[in-house]
Image (cartoon, helix red, strand yellow):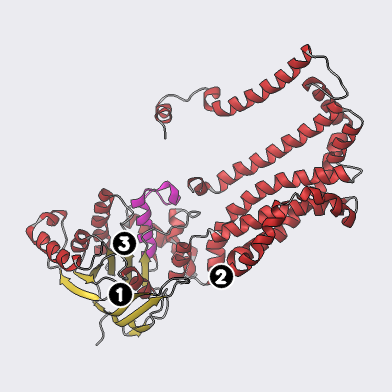
């Protein structure tokens, strides 16, 4: 705790700006970035084939929203995103727990998993599309492939990080295996899994976009690549920024939920 | 007629992988009388914590016999409970739910659990903190929770493994006074492992000094100081004589 913090506690409640000073700094930087971007093209001539401005992006955004195209594309992409994530949880979490719990299995699978995680899976996307086809199946597999590893590694880490002392505590109070799983293992591992979800969501978004870049006829990734192809740069950026905002909202949302649900982790 | 708790000829060797075997206890004998407060002091690594774990039932000795009420100890049981040095509180549970843990594991009804927990919260002096989480508590408070949790299942024997070692000196002194107060009310048999000779003398009826590893009983001291123990007793000549005696017995066992 800094001296500054102690002083604040004794003064009357500060203004909105003072309280949210750090966040406002972030917002200010972003606003400044867009302002500079816009201002540059007041001086430099704009070639609409290759460049765009924030005001044009905003106009393009409004168009897409009004025509319903943006929402439609997002909805289409949301399906393989959600299905792929769900499959990643269902496969990744139990596998990770197994790897963490049974040390030999962990030793056996760790190198393999690390190799897959480190590979540019995004480069495999065309191959996956050849195997699983264009459309929902192909996209879902790509999302799954990218999203499953954070769950595996985080679940395994969570299990390895379980405090042995707590297991001894439960055993000393007469707890059996089942009690150890329910009362110690599960609550210990849950924060790790949620953190894994936070990472997996980012990777799943990339996966959906990449999958749609390569072979799709619908979806937000397809829209981005199509707008790029026809040099509608303003709409392309509008879609890209929308996806970025969604990514930030989801990630920060989970971060906030982690702080609320697992307050003891802050000190770890 | 066997003693209340009895250890005879206990031998225990740890065989960690890739390292030499370590004999923690060898030919270890000791008796504990019912209702007494017995401290065990010894050099680091002498096996005192290991022995507590054997009493708790978490480790089995290689040979020898440990009995309570004449019956062999083969595993954990609700008549023995431990207070741990690092507290061992479940961070995702409130103070009250931490205390209730033992009763939950015994499938006690929720209403009864709550009653017991409430009584213990006030006994250990944590009134008003029932809904707090461990990370919001100081070290001394966390150990009070640990103590309350151990008492919740109404054990006959409390095993305390250097419970105040992680606390600062002032909190430690305070907790010693508190422990005696709680012990007067709860009336359990207590086995208390510590490094601090002062602490051992202040709290106990008897102090057992262990040899260095492999641990065995070196000497047992009777602490004839009157009860209730007052803090002032710590600065009396009798106290200091005892301290010196115990130190002289102990110091040969300490390796630098």
Secondary structure mainly formed by the magenta segment: helix
At 87% from the left and 21% from the top, the residue drawn is A48
Whole-percent x, y for residue B54 in the image: 37, 75
Within 10 Å of the Cα at label 2, are there few (<14), some (14-19), or many (20+) other Cα atoms? few
Question: Do pointers 1 and 3 mark residues of a single chain?
Answer: yes
Residue annotated with mark 1: B214
Residue at image point 40% right, 27% down: A7
Q: CA distance from mark 1 to mark 3?
A: 19 Å
Chain letter behind tag 3: B
> In the rendered image, which residue does mark 3 sit on?
B162
- Give, as a single range, the part of the protein colored magenta: B126-150
Q: Nearer the viewer, mark 1 or mark 2?
A: 1
Residue B55 location (% of width, % of height): 35, 75
Numbered label attached to residue A178: 2
What is the chain identity of the residue bearing mark 2? A
Asked if residue A180 lies left or right of residue B112, the reply is right
């Amino acid at each position: 705790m800094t001296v500054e913090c102690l002083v604040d506690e004794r003064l009357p409640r500060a203004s909105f700006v003072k309280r949210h000073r750090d966040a406002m700094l972030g917002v200010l930087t972003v606003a400044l970035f867009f302002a500079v971007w816009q201002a540059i093209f007041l001086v430099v001539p704009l070639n609409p084939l290759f460049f765009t401005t924030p005001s044009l992006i905003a106009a393009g955004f409004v168009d897409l929203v009004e025509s319903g195209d943006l929402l439609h594309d997002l909805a289409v992409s949301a399906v393989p995103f959600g299905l792929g994530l769900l499959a990643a949880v269902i496969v990744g979490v139990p596998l990770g727990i197994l790897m963490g719990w049974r040390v030999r299995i962990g030793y056996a699978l760790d190198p393999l998993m690390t190799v897959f995680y480190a590979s540019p899976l995004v480069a495999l996307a065309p191959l996956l599309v050849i195997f699983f086809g264009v459309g929902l199946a192909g996209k879902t597999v790509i999302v799954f492939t990218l999203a499953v590893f954070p769950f595996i590694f985080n679940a395994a880490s969570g299990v390895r990080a379980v405090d042995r002392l707590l297991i001894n505590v439960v055993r000393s109070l007469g707890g059996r295996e089942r009690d150890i799983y329910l009362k110690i293992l599960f609550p210990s591992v849950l924060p790790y899994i949620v953190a894994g979800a936070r990472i997996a969501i980012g990777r799943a978004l990339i996966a959906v976009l990449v999958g749609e870049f390569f072979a799709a006829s619908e979806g937000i990734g397809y829209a981005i690549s199509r707008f790029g192809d026809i040099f509608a740069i303003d709409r392309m950026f509008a879609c890209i920024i929308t996806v970025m905002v969604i990514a930030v909202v989801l990630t920060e949302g989970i971060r906030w939920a982690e702080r609320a649900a697992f307050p003891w982790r802050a000190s770890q | 007629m066997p003693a209340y708790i009895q250890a005879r000829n206990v031998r225990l060797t740890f065989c960690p992988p890739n390292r030499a075997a370590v004999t923690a206890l060898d030919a270890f004998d000791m008796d504990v009388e019912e209702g007494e407060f017995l401290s065990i002091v010894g050099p680091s690594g002498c096996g005192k914590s290991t022995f507590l774990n054997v009493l708790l039932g978490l480790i089995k000795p290689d040979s020898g016999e440990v009995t309570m009420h004449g019956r062999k100890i083969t595993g954990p049981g609700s008549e023995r409970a431990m207070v741990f040095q690092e507290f061992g509180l479940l961070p995702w549970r409130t103070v009250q739910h931490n205390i209730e843990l033992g009763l939950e594991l015994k499938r006690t009804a929720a209403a009864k659990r709550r009653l017991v927990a409430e009584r213990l919260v006030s006994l250990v002096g944590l009134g008003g903190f029932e809904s707090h989480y461990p990370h919001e508590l100081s070290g001394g408070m966390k150990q009070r929770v640990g103590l309350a949790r151990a008492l919740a299942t109404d054990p006959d024997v409390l095993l305390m493994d250097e419970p105040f070692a992680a606390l600062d000196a002032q909190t430690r002194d305070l907790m010693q006074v508190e422990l005696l107060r709680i012990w007067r009310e709860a009336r359990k048999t207590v086995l208390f492992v510590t490094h601090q000779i002062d602490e051992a003398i202040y709290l106990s009826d008897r102090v057992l000094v262990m040899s260095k590893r492999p641990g065995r009983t070196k000497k047992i001291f009777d602490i004839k100081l009157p009860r209730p123990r007052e803090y002032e007793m710590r600065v009396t000549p009798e106290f200091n004589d005892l301290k010196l005696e115990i130190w002289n017995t102990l110091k040969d066992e300490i390796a630098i």
